[in-house]
Image (spheres, grey):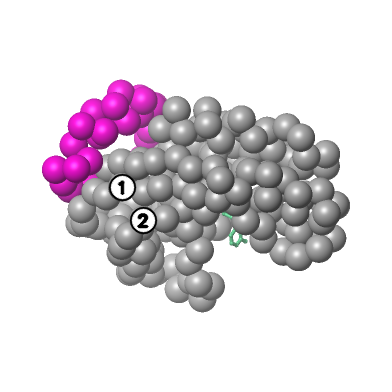
Amino acid sequence: MYRLFVGLALPDDVREQLARFNHGLPGARWVAPENTHLTLRFIGDVDRHAAADIDSTLQGVDTDSFDVWLSGLGVFGQGRKTRALYVRAEAPSGLTHLQGKVESAVVRAGQPPETRKFSPHVTVARFRSAHPDRIQAFVERNGLFRAGPIAVTRFVLFESHMGKGGSIYEELADYPLNLTHSTKDEAKRFESQRPEHAVRP
Ligand code: 3AM
């Protein structure tokens, strides 16, 4: 079985910027810099045939590249039940458009539709037992965090390997977006960081 999700990989310099958060909040389990990503669609456990079908419909996604910005912090959950700390992601329209196309492709491959609203974010920490006051103070202290523009010129089918030390995400396949003028130069920089081992399911 493959535990899959579709998302965006982040350039190394943005991962490094996010890694600067990784202290000053007791009880936080920080996401390792190489694992930070933006989830477009969680799929879950599927067999090899379903994974191949998903790969095939994702290859048919035809849409333009765009820029994304990271801006400010937020949390999922409330009070002692705060589950995650994230950085908000913003893109004028490109991100929602791509997410819609990915959603249609995944459903076309036979997966059940997503019922929850898309809220673009990059998770930076998770909590088992949260200290709400400390988290609130941390969010306020780092509220001015900004990164971008980040050129989104491809999206990725990730496999999630769950382990004791947290999940590790492997790129199984990636899918290019149509390059637009504003993202062309950025794309070259990002392309040079792309792992060479990406393999189709
Ligand atoms: O992008 P983030 O890190 O917030 O929380 C999981 C992670 O989100 C989420 O999918 C991303 C890659 O693992 N995820 C894990 N299990 C999930 C589930 N059962 C889930 N999302 C929805 N339903």
The reply to whether discs 1 and 2 touch (Cβ–Cβ < 8 Å) is yes
The structure residue drawn at horizontal position 35% and vertical position 42%, both measured from the top left corner, is 149
The structure residue drawn at horizontal position 35% and vertical position 29%, both measured from the top left corner, is 194
Where residue 124 sits in the image (x, y, percent)? 62, 43
Q: Is residue 124 magenta?
A: no
Near mark 1 (Cα within 10 A), the count class, few <14, some 14-19 or many ≥20, is some
Decide if residue 101 is in sight here: yes
Residue closest to the eye, 117 or 101 = 117
Q: Which amino acid lies under the numbered mark 2 shown in the image of this protein?
A: Ala
Residue 186 position by quadrant? top left
Q: Which amino acid lies under the numbered mark 1 shown in the image of this protein?
A: Asp
Report the side of 34 relative to 173 (left or right): right
**Where are the magenta residues, as a range?**
174-201
Q: Which mark is residue 91?
A: 2
Residue closest to the eye, 177 or 72 = 72
Q: Is residue 196 magenta?
A: yes
Where residue 100 sits in the image (x, y, percent)? 34, 67
Where residue 85 sits in the image (x, y, percent)? 66, 50
Residue 167 position by quadrant? top right
Looking at the rendered image, the quarter that the C terminus falls into is: top left
Residue closest to the eye, 55 or 99 = 99
Decide if residue 159 is in sight here: no
Quarter containing ligand 1?
bottom right
> Marks 1 and 2, Cα distance to the nearest angstrom?
6 Å
Disc 2 is placed on an element classified as: loop
Report the side of 37 relative to 24 (left or right): left
**Which residue does the numbered mark 1 point to in the structure image?**
67
